[in-house]
Image (spheres, rainbow, N blue to C red):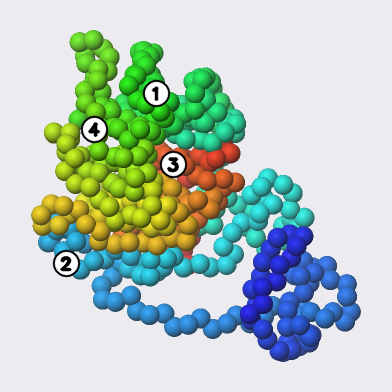
Amino acid sequence: MDIETDGRFGNKRVHNRLGPGSGGAPSSTTGKVCNFWRAGRCNRFPCPYLHSELPEAAAPPKRPAGPGGNVWRNPNSGGRGGGGHNRWGRGPGGGSGAASHRPPDRPCKFFLAGTDCSYGERCRYPHSYCISDSITMLTLLKGHEKGVTGIALPTGSDKLYSGSKDGTVRMWDCQTGQCAGVITMGREVGCMISEGPWLFVGIPDAVKVWNMQTAAEMNLTGPTGQVYALAVASELLFAATQDGRILAWRFSAATNCFEPAASLDGHKLAVVSLIVGGMRLYSASMDKTIRVWDLATLQCIQTLSDHTDVVMSVLCWDQFLLSCSLDQTIKVWAATESGNLEVTYTHKEEQGALALSGMPDAQSKPVLLCSLNDNTARLYDLPSFSDRGRIFSKQEIRAIQMGPGGLFFTGDGTGELKVWQWVEAAQT
C-alpha cells in the first residue's frame, strides 16, 4: 500500500498497488491516479499516471453484532443496571467500540482555516463545518478573542450568553445574531450556567451571580483557584474548584443572597465537571476518579476509578451515568443490585474525549455529542453508539449547550461560537 502526500495541498490519499488500468483507462507505470487529472487540469500526454479512479477494494465481511437489536430496553421494565442483556454499542460502528468511517472523512482544510481553496467548487472535500445529514450550521458568532468556556441560554430570555478565557461575557441577540453587550470580568471565565432567572459565572477564586429579572449582582467567595464547573440542585449551588473541593451555597430568601452551606472534600486534584441525576451529584476530576455524592447528606457514597486518565466530563442519561476521559474512552455506568455503579459498556475513541452533552434529534431520539482533542466532535445515537456524523472546528470544542427547538451551540478554543440546528434526515 502506498501513501501519496501532495505537499502543496496537504491531502493524503491511500491506494492499493495495482497493475495497468483496464476498461480503456490509460496505462500507468506507477499504479497511481494523476492528481492533476483529478483537478481537471492535466496537460501531459502521455501521462505516466492513471486518468481514472482505482477500483475500491472489497470490504471484509462484517461480523454479526450478536443477538438483539439496536433498541435499548428500559431497565424499569425488568432487571436493573448492568443485569440482563447489554444493548449498549450494538449499532453500526458501536459493536467494536469505534464508529465506521466513510470518505471523505474531513472537510477542506483551507475552508476550515478560513482561507481560499484553489479548487473552489471542484474541491473533493466538503466546504462545511460538519459531515452529517442530521444537522446544519445556522450561523457563526465571532467576538471572543480566546477560547469559549461556557454557554448559557436563560429560560425566557432572548439573549444567549457566552464566557471566554479572554475575561469577558458576551450577550448575543437571538433574533439578529449580533453582540448586544460585553461584560468585562477581568479574569478568565472557567464555566457558566443558568438556572431560571439566574446566571452563574465561574472565575478564579469566585462565582459571579446575576439575576436577569431584577438586575441583582452578587460575588460568592470561597473557591481557591479557577472554578471549572457549576451545578444547581436541591436549592443548592455547587462549584467545582481547582483545589479539588466542591463548594455549596444555599439561597436565602430572607437575605436575598446565597450563603455558604458546605464543602465537599475528597478529590485529590481539580474537579472539572459536575452533573446532577436523581438525588445524586457526580463529580469528575483530574485525579482520574468520579465521586458520587448523596444530595440529602452531602456525603460521598462511592468513588469510581475505572478511568486511567483525567475524567473530563460526566452526563446523566435515563438510568445511566456517562463519562469521558483523556484515556480515549466513553464509559457507561449502571446501578447493580446493591445500588453501586459499575461499567456496563466502554466505547473507545481514537483521541482523548473532552466534553459530553446529550440532546434529542429532529425525531426526538437521544443523541450524544462528544468533543475530542483532535478539534472534532462526534455525534452518536444512544444507546447503540451508531455514528451520526462529525463536527469540525479550528481548535478544541470545550463548551456545548442545548437550546430550544432543536438548537444547540458549540464554542471552540479560538473564541468562535457556532449555532446548530437538527434537521430531518434525507430519505434514501
Residue, disc 2: 84
Residues 274 and 153: in front is 274
Q: Is residue 303 above or below residue 46?
A: above
Image-based side of 112 in relation to 219, left or right: right
**In the drawing, does residue 284 fall left or right of residue 149?**
left
The residue lying at 89 percent from left, 79 percent from top is 45
Residue 379 x/y as whole percent: 43, 55
Q: Is residue 156 visible?
A: no
Is disc 2 surrounded by few (<14), some (14 to 19) or many (20+) residues within 10 Å? few
Indicate which disc, 3 or 4, sits on the residue closer to the N terminus. Answer: 4
Which mark sits nearer the N-terminus, 4 or 1? 1
Give the image location of residue 235, x and y in percent.
Answer: 21, 26
**Left or right: residue 31 compared with residue 343:** right
Q: Name, please, the residue furthest toward the front.
A: 268
Q: Residue type at mark 2?
A: Gly
Q: Which residue is mark 1?
A: 205
- Which residue lies at the image location 47% right of the left edge and 61% below the top edge? 350
